[in-house]
């Protein structure tokens, strides 16, 4: 009877030892599988990133080669078309602004242009010409900007107002005396924006697909 019990105990010990060994083997296998999966994922991510860079480089090279083969006159026409569209969209956007907003833009430009000047510098014989606005708007703007200066508005019949190129339909002022000339216009603001942020404005006003065309 004792021998039978000893045999059962031995069998249980052998089974327990086998179970522990099997657990260790399974844990090691799980860890190895997890490590292999992580390695494959890292390799896959690296391969995808490398493919993306390679594609971007080939795309840029193809675009550069394609543009190099495009005749110069075609590229000039494409550039002129984009510029024309950009001007039209900028004009449309300016036209959509409330009148008060346009005049406030002009006023801020005027303040910046003449911020370092004292009213006395304009007191003697200064003449104001204007365009894109009526006489009442011009006088109201000057009263806020230079309330103490002795300024004379040019007669509409004597002056066509300052010219500011492609955006000269919008409000503009020029104050001129013997020593000082101050000019401010919504056109200046538009041109500065186009010069400094052309790519962003082109994408916003025309759409990225037109910019990339």
Image: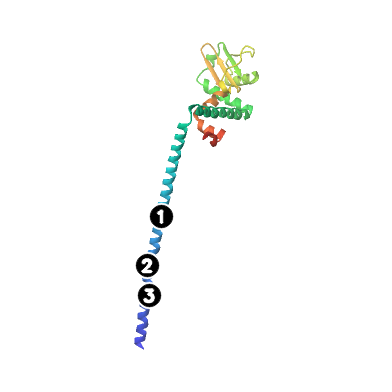
The residue drawn where x is 56% and y is 25% is 108
Find residue 31 and name its label. Answer: none
Front position in the image: 74 or 123? 74
In the depicted structure, whether residue 42 falls above or below residue 78: below
Q: Position of residue 199 (x, y in %)?
A: 50, 32
State the quadrant of the N terminus: bottom left
Hey, which quadrant is residue 190 in on the image?
top right
In the depicted structure, whether residue 91 falls above or below residue 18: above
Label 3 neighbour load within 10 Å: few <14, some 14-19, many 20+: few
Q: Nearer the viewer, mark 3 or mark 2?
A: 2
Label 1 neighbour load within 10 Å: few <14, some 14-19, many 20+: few
Q: Position of residue 119 (x, y in %)?
A: 54, 16
Give the secondary structure at mark 1.
helix
User: Which tag, 2 or 1, sits closer to the chain's start?
Assistant: 2
Q: Nearer the viewer, mark 2 or mark 1?
A: 1
Q: Distance of mark 2 from mark 1, alpha carbons?
A: 22 Å
Hey, which quadrant is residue 135 in on the image?
top right
Front position in the image: 61 or 157? 61
Residue corresponding to mark 3: 16
Q: Position of residue 198 (x, y in %)?
A: 51, 30
Tally the numbered discs: 3
Q: Distance of mark 3 from mark 2, alpha carbons?
A: 14 Å
Spot the residue most to the bottom: 1
Residue corresponding to mark 1: 40
Front position in the image: 209 or 109? 209
Q: Position of residue 118 (x, y in %)?
A: 52, 17
Find residue 25 and name its label. Answer: 2
Give the secondary structure at mark 3.
helix
The residue drawn where x is 53% and y is 25% is 191
Give the secondary structure at mark 2.
helix
Asked if residue 159 lies left or right of residue 47, the reply is: right
């Amino acid at each position: 009877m004792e021998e039978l019990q000893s045999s059962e105990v031995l069998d249980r010990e052998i089974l327990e030892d086998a179970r522990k060994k099997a657990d260790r083997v399974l844990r090691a296998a799980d860890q190895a599988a997890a490590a292999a999966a992580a390695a494959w994922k890292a390799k896959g991510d690296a391969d995808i990133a490398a493919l993306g860079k390679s594609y971007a480089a080939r795309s840029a090279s193809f675009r550069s080669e394609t543009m190099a083969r495009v005749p110069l006159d075609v590229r000039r026409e494409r550039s002129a078309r984009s510029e024309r569209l950009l001007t039209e969209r900028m004009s449309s956007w300016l036209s959509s602004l409330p009148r008060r907003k346009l005049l406030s833009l002009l006023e801020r430009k005027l303040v910046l242009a003449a911020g370092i000047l004292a009213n006395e510098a304009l007191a003697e014989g200064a003449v104001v010409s204007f365009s894109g606005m009526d006489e009442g708007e011009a006088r109201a703007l000057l009263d806020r900007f230079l309330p103490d200066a002795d300024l004379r508005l040019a007669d509409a019949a004597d002056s066509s107002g300052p010219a500011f190129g492609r955006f000269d339909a919008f409000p503009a002022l020029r104050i001129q005396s013997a020593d000082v000339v101050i000019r401010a216009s919504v056109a200046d603001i538009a041109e500065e924006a186009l010069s400094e942020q052309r790519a962003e404005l082109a994408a916003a006003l025309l759409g990225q697909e037109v910019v990339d065309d």
